[in-house]
Amino acid sequence: MKKFLLGTVALIALGSAANAADLAARYTKAPVMAPVSNWTGFYLSGGFGYGIWDASSRSVVTGTGIPTAAGDLHSGGRGYFGTVGGGYDYQLAPSWVIGVFGDAQFGDVNGTVTDPAALANARSKNDVSYAAGVRLGYLIAPDVLSYVNAGYSHAHFKNGAYVDIVTGAPTGNSLRNSNRDGWFIGGGVENSLNFFGINAPGWFMRTDYRVAEYGRKSVDNVDSVTGALIGTSLSNKLYEQTVSTSLVYRFNSHVSSASSAGYRGYTKAPAVGVNWTGFHIGGGGGYGLLSADSREVNAITGAPAFATNTKPSGHGYFGTVSGGYDWQINPTWVVGIFGDAQFGDIKGNMLDRDLSSIASLKNDINYAAGVRVGYLVAPDVLSYVNGGYSHAQVKGANYYSANSGSLDALATRKTGFDGWFIGGGVENSLNFFGINAPGWFMNTEYRVAEYDRKNIQNYFTATNADAPTALSTKMYVQTVSTSLVYRFNWGSPVVAKY
């Protein structure tokens, strides 16, 4: 529950691509010139976040890397972290900011990794991460910066002792701790606390989304007592997706007049105000990670077959289509309803211990219906939060042997999961790109969804008859997407005066 509340706070204006509209806005009368914050200078930050990781693992011979089992097995984890950081920004022009930064995360993004040859689980916790990178941002308002960032990322994973999946008893072996090096890309929004009506000079709030990829590395299995090598290692490749919210203090932030800074926003008043009330449709693409908790059970009684659960996971891309209706209830607030669907390949796999077999876990279709509430940070830039019902479909798949790779006699049935989601994003007109396209917008959105536990039924492929076992599975899916949106009545007059 808490992770979804975190998503609400964190995603006031997620902007990995929250590219803002031209702020030579269509007001019905010209407002007073807005003050401009100076973004050049040092800053410090601290906050919290939530993440999901996915590891694609295989058992190999230590030193040679020769696989000891057929194929990789996906497993992962999820959890919270705290973050601290610092950096330096330079305001290139009235609207553009570049910067360098470093930050660290300390927390409990934990799960398990499974050795597909030993059929044993080991706890694995990403307890420390740090990153160094650069960012490029655009001022969608004098004290609201939308940015993209990228750079180097390092992660430390604290690993534990293996336990047998069937009995839950320690195997006598452990997985060594590991350090991983990789890269990240992401983006976000940073705004002064004046946005919330708080008079706190120098203080800002930042929401940041990142996806990191770490190269494949072999981590040695050792004797739990002596620490001696046992001859096998776990080779895996890691992906991690995080969202965080931080409080930022900028040491030299000060306010000057718009004219002295040369800021071009809010300086003329065309005759007609914009109107967000009306229907809209959209289409685009995105990327997601899934994390699950799974156990083999008796398909009739639900009794667990084994002592421990596994943590299947996966990642991949998807396409999305959407439609909805918004109401502009006053000059700065918009509410709406919407529905959308995702079609793609968020894919991993899962283990059925009874057969020592692996089957694909592919989330190929999702759809959702919900509501959103948004605030107009500029006349054609909407920052919003949303929530509602979500449905996810997992595609059926054949099992294959974890050791030989040959097909087994069982497969999984296609299964639908019901749950709910919460998230947020930014929607802006295409004027940012210098495109004169009335009614056309870009939307960038983050979501996290939780689905109820449900059985994925096993069946015999030869007869299509249900098997006596099923995989009881609870899923979490975290996504980020960008869509092109068309608003049918964009530009019609607004009755309310600005």
Image: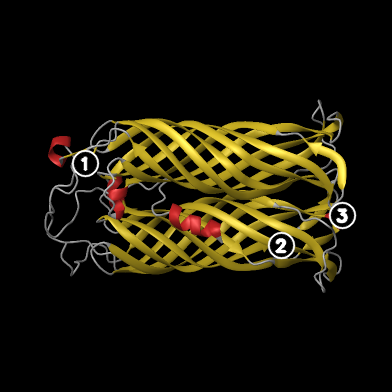
Where residue 167 appears, as percent x and y from the top left, is 88, 54
Could you say which quadrant of the image residue 145 lies in?
top left
Give the Cα separation between the discs numbered 2 and 1.
51 Å
Is the Cβ of the residue at disc 3 closer than 8 Å to that at disc 2?
no
Q: Position of 360 compared to 342: left or right?
A: right
Of marks 2 and 1, the one in the foreground: 1
Disc 3 or 1, which lies upstream in sequence?
A: 1
Residue drawn 23% across the image and 48% down it: 23
At mark 1, the secondary structure is strand
At mark 3, the secondary structure is loop
Which residue in the structure is indicated by mark 2? 473
Could you say which quadrant of the image residue 477 lies in?
bottom right
- As rendered, which of 90 and 226 lies closer to the eye? 226
Residue drawn 68% across the image and 62% down it: 474
Query: Residue most toward the bottom?
Result: 300
Tell me the number on the disc at residue 220.
none
Mark 3 nearby-residue class (10 Å; few <14, some 14–19, many ≥20): some
Q: Is residue 242 above or below residue 418?
A: above
Which residue in the structure is indicated by mark 1? 36
Residue drawn 60% across the image and 37% down it: 128
Residue drawn 80% across the image and 41% down it: 161
Residue 404 visible in the picture: no
Mark 3 residue type: Val
Could you say which quadrant of the image residue 72 lies in?
top right
At mark 2, the secondary structure is strand
Disc 3 or 2, which lies upstream in sequence?
A: 3
Q: Quadrant of the N terminus?
A: bottom right
Where residue 421 appears, as percent x and y from the top left, is 52, 63
Which residue in the structure is indicated by mark 3? 166
